[in-house]
Image: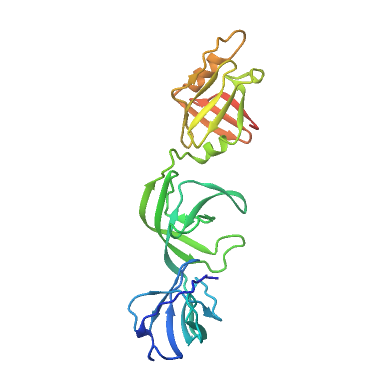
Amino acid sequence: MIKFSTLLCLPLTAFSLTSLAQTNDFTIKMKSGIQKEQALQVKYYNSADWEPFYAKIESFSYDPNYSYELRIRRTKVANSVPNKPSYRYTLLNTVQKSQVNSEKIILEINDKWVDCQGVGQMKCLQVRSTPKDDWEYFHSHINGFDYEEGYIYKLIVKRTKIENPPQDASAYQYDLVKIVTKTASKNKRSLPTAAVFLSRHKWKLISLNGKDVAKYNAHLLFDADKGRISGNSSCNNFFGPFIITSNTIEFPNIGTTMRACMGDNIESDLYQVLENRELHYDIAEQTFNLYIKNKHVAIFGLTEK
């Protein structure tokens, strides 16, 4: 249901009677596709352009999937008070109600994927119609749109009503018409979804160059918001930035504490792996795996922070 404010300003040309009339009837056309919290868009009998209509129409419920032609009665409120409506608007009859199968809408797309609930747990985009709206989960796909995290988009999209959609599927098909703007996020760093997942857990090193090294308690922590890592090498603590793409990862400029490493440790071998510039990775169930030229060189196991 669309919410309306209590203020209304209508052009005098909309009515055939004078402003002193207590009651008069008129016809309007109403546009489809208006989102929640926005003013309805109407045309009067002599209007060339769509105009905002803010008032509540009694006995009328708006569905954005339809366009309308309505017959409305306007009645002056007796003894009206300041800051309250001076007129009541009542639906007399619906002259025409037409379902719109396809329409162009504007969508803003937020700068990263988010966890959401659809048919099970999934990743969703966040969308809104105007900057004043709250971000909402978008469970569908926009055909022709190649989304890149780290950017906020403004799109013109064609939304088409699907006849008899499959159960649990979207009732609409979305097709990209035009990318109006693509703006880099104001966040310091926007990283792929894998980085967000990695940052939720502590990763304990359990295998290095094919050897079981779990006893050394070396571990790795990710901070997706800052784009940095920290951890322990079995002797010293280490820290630094990380760069991640769809299947590659780099740990440039690793810094460490300067503790003397006495006794058995794996620090040198671990740094040799982490500082390699040809690292690839994958995440399989509860392990984070590193590869150098397709050779499996490190396995980190998921543990709680």
Determine the residue located farthest toward the top in the rendered image: 262
Q: How is the image coloured?
A: rainbow
Residue occupying the point 48% across, 37% down: 246
The x, y position of residue 68, in whole percent, is 47, 79
- Taking the image as shown, residue 177 lies to the left or right of residue 99, namely left
Residue 226, relative to residue 254: is it above or below? below
Q: Quadrant of the N terminus?
A: bottom right
Specify the farthest residue to the left: 48
At 47% from the left and 70% from the top, the residue drawn is 101
Q: Residue at x 52, y 66 (%)?
A: 162
Q: Across the whole image, how many numbered discs are drawn on residues?
A: 0
Residue 154, image quadrant: bottom left
Q: Is residue 112 left or right of residue 179?
A: right
Furthest-right residue in view?
215
Give the side of residue 172 with respect to residue 146, left or right: right
The x, y position of residue 18, in whole percent, is: 38, 90
Percent of width and height locating residue 259:
55, 12
Vertical position of residue 268 compared to residue 69: above or below: above
Residue 174 pos. (x, y %): 46, 60
Question: Quarter of the image containing the C terminus?
Answer: top right
Residue depicted at 62% across the width and 62% down the height: 167
Above or below, comparing residue 207 to residue 246 in the picture: above
Does residue 96 appear to the left or right of 261 in the view shown?
left
